[in-house]
Amino acid sequence: MSHATQDHATLSKQFNKDEARVNWHDETLWFVRQKRDKMAFSLSEWELLRGAASAIKDNVLSNLHDYLVEFEAKAQQNGVHVHWAANGAEHNQIVHSILKNHGVTQMVKSKSMLTEECHLNEYLAKNGVEVIDTDLGERIVQMREEPPSHIVLPAIHLKKEDVGETFHQHLGTEKGNKDPQYLTEAARQHLREKFLTRKLALTGVNFAIAETGEFVVCTNEGNADMGAHLADVHIACMGFEKILPKREHLGVFLRLLARSATGQPITTYSSHFKKPREGQEMHIVIVDNGRSTQLGRADFRNSLKCIRCAACFNTCPVYRRSGGHSYHTAIAGPIGSILAPNLDMARNADLPFASTLCGSCSNVCPVKIDIHDQLYKWRQVLVQEGHAPLSKKLMMRGMTFTLSNPKVYRLGGKIGRWALRNAPFMVNNGLNPWFSQRDMPEAPKESFREWYLKRQKE
Amino acid sequence: MKAVFYLFINGLKIKKMSRDKILAAIRQNQPALKPLPSLSGLNQCTFEAKEQYKNVLKSIGGHIVEVDNETEIVQYIRENYTQGHRFITTLPQFAPIAETNWSDNDPHDLENVELMLMAGTFGVAENSAIWVTEGGLGQRVAPFICQNLAIVLNAHDIVPTMHEAYERIGSADYGFGVFIAGPSKTADIEQSLVLGAHGARTLVVFLVNGA
Ligand code: SF4
């Protein structure tokens, strides 16, 4: 078992040191989840929409080869250069070669989880290229030299005091001023200068349409458009699963995306890029980076239906109380825990265990991915392949033994309840991970089984 | 020279190799073909389109100004935006109050625009988005770089949901098209909503009633 970094449990422990902040994180994300519910419940066709979105994505995955070929041909007809990257390294080289061709060493970038996945910023920095992230949340974490902790709300782990201090250091805002309006205005001025002076802009892609060769980028801030429409060169990077067959399918996905993500009826801007503007050069980089392997894993291919709305993050009790950084991967949360082991089983073996399997993620997912089932299936695969974290292995072995021996199970329960009542220090000690950052409930005197048997006798 | 040529060919080969490798892996790994679902019956909304449009726009930070004619629009603009600043429009009838000859300029030249006035092709009641394509924008960057955006929308041109919106767009050809819903905004600092992130700080929709 090789861990290049600390595992989820260790990193969560660090996040949980500040209880007030964890509670705030938990409540804020739950609030976003409630906004999503309000939107979902206000549409009586919500479940029909989820069903349609899921079925469209099923069709896409089953016909990806032809859709991608069609998309490429249409995009080329539209005057767009199309590139293919087998992995993150190749993606980064392609972007760098375009920069070099234009003699450009500074660029702006709007939110693209794919470039996070490929570690593009680090690669370009090593090669002498300055990248400015223009999404406000991403700019904040970039200044702090941190990765985003959430795919839709990149700086959700920070309080306004933190942002105030960061901007004071980097943008010269007043010390101690933490007013969001004031800080956003400072960022607006700072980034406007970048938009106006940078010759190359990179954006992500939310949807790419095979039928027309166009791609759609959704933002609230307008940063993708400010970058792309002012730059001489626009590069759009996409994982190959972003394909939709026809333009009309956007109707389904644009109805679901923002409602699921932030509880808005739609993002402020849904920009459809089809051809470069006159005199502009436009590139699309289509990236595999493990996706074709995932497509071949029948149990896990559904994860490729994800539209990155983050509803599964906001609802997840583990994510809310452990924070995005504890997942040590570009895409955190429940879906990240399915995607990451595909890329590197050994390094990410802990992630499918960072879940209670409560199923809330699957219930909110707008494309109906069976997220918690897949997490469960990954556990089996990881154990079989010898990648399971040791503590989990022992625990699972212990659990199999206990659960398959009813007498042992009952005895264990009795001892546990007795201990909680009479000797809480025996469970509430450093050896019991359930006790760290939690207060144990008061134990009932009898188990459900004991109560039930007694009731039957009465 | 030969070496350069060889390198070039080699580069192309590598490029093509990744493409073919990716597509071959996809072909091999994609599951058996599943049919596309029907998109009919996905709109079950019962609202009245215009009322819904107005309510949603207000709820996302936009302003509705109902007018009967262009004179009222001119009057509103004279009274509500800082005069003496740069106003631009794509609509020739507003030439008396705004510049009309700017669509061939360098887009950076729009940096100091205070107000951009344009026409929306149609609006969508369920989310108050307005669809506009390149021709109606003058310049792609115009509705983003301006400090304030105002869109003239015919009250008859409101469809209920995104399904009807795409029906209406059909197979139209455009270089760039955008749905705009409200002013630019962010909640990236502690989830506090702030209007005016990088795009327009305000959005006024002139809803033209009558005829
Ligand atoms: S898995 Fe589903 S809920 Fe989670 S981000 Fe993707 S689409 Fe959204």
Image (cartoon, coloured by chain):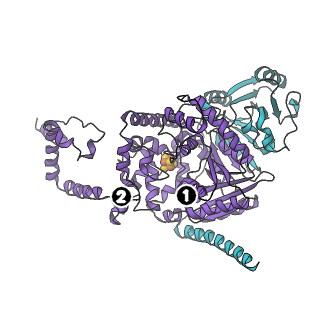
Chain colours: A purple, B cyan
Choose top left, top right, bottom left or bottom right for residue A417: top left
| Residue of label 2 | A379
Quarter of the picture holding the C terminus of chain B: top right
- On the question of residue A367 being in view, the answer is no
The reply to whether dot 1 and dot 2 touch (C-beta < 8 Å) is: no
Secondary structure under tag 1 reads loop
**Towards the viewer: B178 or B49:** B178
Secondary structure under tag 2 reads helix
- On the question of residue A80 being in view, the answer is yes
Classify A145 as above or below A87: above
Choose top left, top right, bottom left or bottom right for residue A413: top left
- A423 relative position to A433: left or right: left
Chain under disc 1: A
- B136 relative position to B20: left or right: right
Q: Amino acid under label 1?
A: Cys
Q: Are marks 1 and 2 on the same chain?
A: yes
Classify B173 as above or below A16: below
Task: Determine the residue positioned at 86% across, 33% down.
Answer: B99
Classify A290 as above or below A54: below
**Towards the viewer: B174 or A288:** A288
**Where residue A118 is drawn, which disc sits there?**
1
Q: Amino acid under label 2?
A: Arg
